[in-house]
Amino acid sequence: MSPHLVVIGTGYAGLLAALRAARIARGRLTVTLVGASDQLVERVRLHEQAASGRSVAHPIAALLAGTAVRFVHARALEVAPGRLVTDAGVIQFDRAIVCTGGSVDLDLVPGAREHAFAIDGDRMARLFGEARRIAECGGRLAVCGGGLTGVEIATELAEAVPGLRVELVSASEIVPALSHKAREHARAALRRLGVTVREGVRVTAVAADHLDTAAGPIAFDLCAWAAGFRAMPLLAGLGLPMAADGRVIVDSHLYARPDLLVAGDAAAFATPGGWLAAGCKTAMPMAAHAADTAVAEMTGGQMDAFSFGDPGYCVSLGRRDGIVQFVDAAGQPRERILKGRVAAWIKERVCRYTVFALRAEQRRLMAYRWQHGAVRPLVAVEAVR
Ligand SMILES: Cc1cc2nc3c(=O)[nH]c(=O)nc-3n(C[C@H](O)[C@H](O)[C@H](O)COP(=O)(O)OP(=O)(O)OC[C@H]3O[C@@H](n4cnc5c(N)ncnc54)[C@H](O)[C@@H]3O)c2cc1C
């Protein structure tokens, strides 16, 4: 029987890892994809779903059609050495790639879990309906979190839902990862769309109808939570070293344990500048590298360490505006940006490319490629194997 590679998670990282491993293994391995969901949710478009109601999910069956990847629709409960326990039974494996992702942190402050919509998964269709309902009588939407996700959701909904009063609340200045020029453009776009922006205001709790903040209460009819990040709980059960946000620490080849690689938002990859940021732009390269590494190792080959060159940031500000932020070799923002319709157009192409890349791997048209660069791991985490 051929060696068995199991990939856990049906997000961008899990699908890419499974499709790529099956393509390059050419029948020398059995590849199984295990997912709690039988859909790929295009998370980079969740704010679009909240504003339009249009589904951003694709059936896994269609994305795996014609490939040798076997799909098991099950939630992983425990990853013991060589043995995956799921709610649909036990699966033995030789190597596994864990790609279970993460989400906004609903436990960051009391009440967020009970009273706020997470910018996540399948709740966007409900947020779409609720936002329209409250807009009919001039209702207020509070968006908590001034990072890229918070700004994207605030601008998208303010543009798409007439009558909705949107307030963006951020503990720090908005979009801190971007340059001053980019931040000023984001502020101008938010102003143009009528969004009230409160920077430097930390939310301490979420109640049913208001936020508690150091600057006093902020009333809302609807609250969207876009702050913080937490990796999925499965990872805590592995008993492996983790970063503070619950991501599992991996070595330079993305191994967390001799039988286990971790990729995407689930993985903490140390660089001299800190952990590599979670994001689709890091998740897909990690997944491709993890697949290459696992197949090489299981079929007697060798792989180099993971390397990644930051391509920069693409941010949407509604459907007609955006920001493309260029970065230097260390991933730090340059002052150079693109904005307006050109940036919105580029952002749309980048989003399309994610699913196109999966289909290209599926149909063997093209191998997913990414920008390599100077990001190298710290020596301190080189002890896994
Ligand atoms: C609104 C929004 C906009 C974004 N825009 C950008 C952007 O412009 N650029 C960018 O780089 N990033 C962006 N991101 C971040 C990006 O979406 C994530 O980094 C990316 O989805 C990570 O991919 P992943 O495959 O690691 O995890 P995910 O996409 O989260 O997939 C994880 C998968 O694992 C499954 N899973 C979890 N637990 C289990 C379990 N126990 N058993 C089985 N399956 C399990 C889940 O069901 C899911 O299918 C955005 C995110 C949001 C929310």
Image: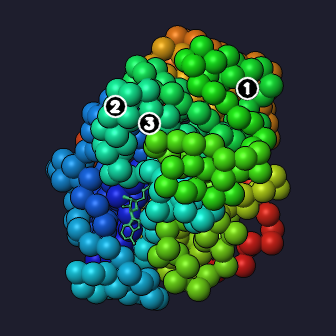
Quadrant containing the N terminus in the rendered view? bottom left
Residue situated in front as seen by the camera: 326 or 373: 326
The amino acid type of the residue labelled 1 equals Arg
In the displayed structure, 305 sits above or below 184; it is below
Label 3 CB-ligand 1 distance < 8 A:
yes
Q: Which residue is mark 2?
A: 132
Q: Is residue 363 visible?
A: yes
Which label was assigned to residue 333?
A: none
Q: Which residue is mark 3?
A: 47
Q: Assess whether mark 2 and mark 3 are in contact (beta carbons under 8 angstroms).
A: no
Q: Which residue is mark 1?
A: 183
| Label 1 to label 3: alpha-carbon separation | 19 Å
Label 2 CB-ligand 1 distance < 8 A:
no
Decide if residue 202 is on the left or right side of residue 55: right
| Label 2 to label 1: alpha-carbon separation | 28 Å
Q: Earlier in the sequence, mark 3 or mark 2?
A: 3
The amino acid type of the residue labelled 3 equals His
Q: Assess whether mark 3 and mark 1 are in contact (beta carbons under 8 angstroms).
A: no
Q: Secondary structure at mark 2?
A: helix
Decide if residue 356 is on the left or right side of residue 196: left
Q: Earlier in the sequence, mark 2 or mark 1?
A: 2
Where on the picture, by quarter, is residue 79?
A: bottom left
Check disc 3: other Cα within 10 Å, few if <14, some if 14-19, many if 20+.
many
Q: Position of residue 311 (x, y in %)?
A: 64, 34
The amino acid type of the residue labelled 2 equals Arg
Check disc 1: other Cα within 10 Å, few if <14, some if 14-19, many if 20+.
some
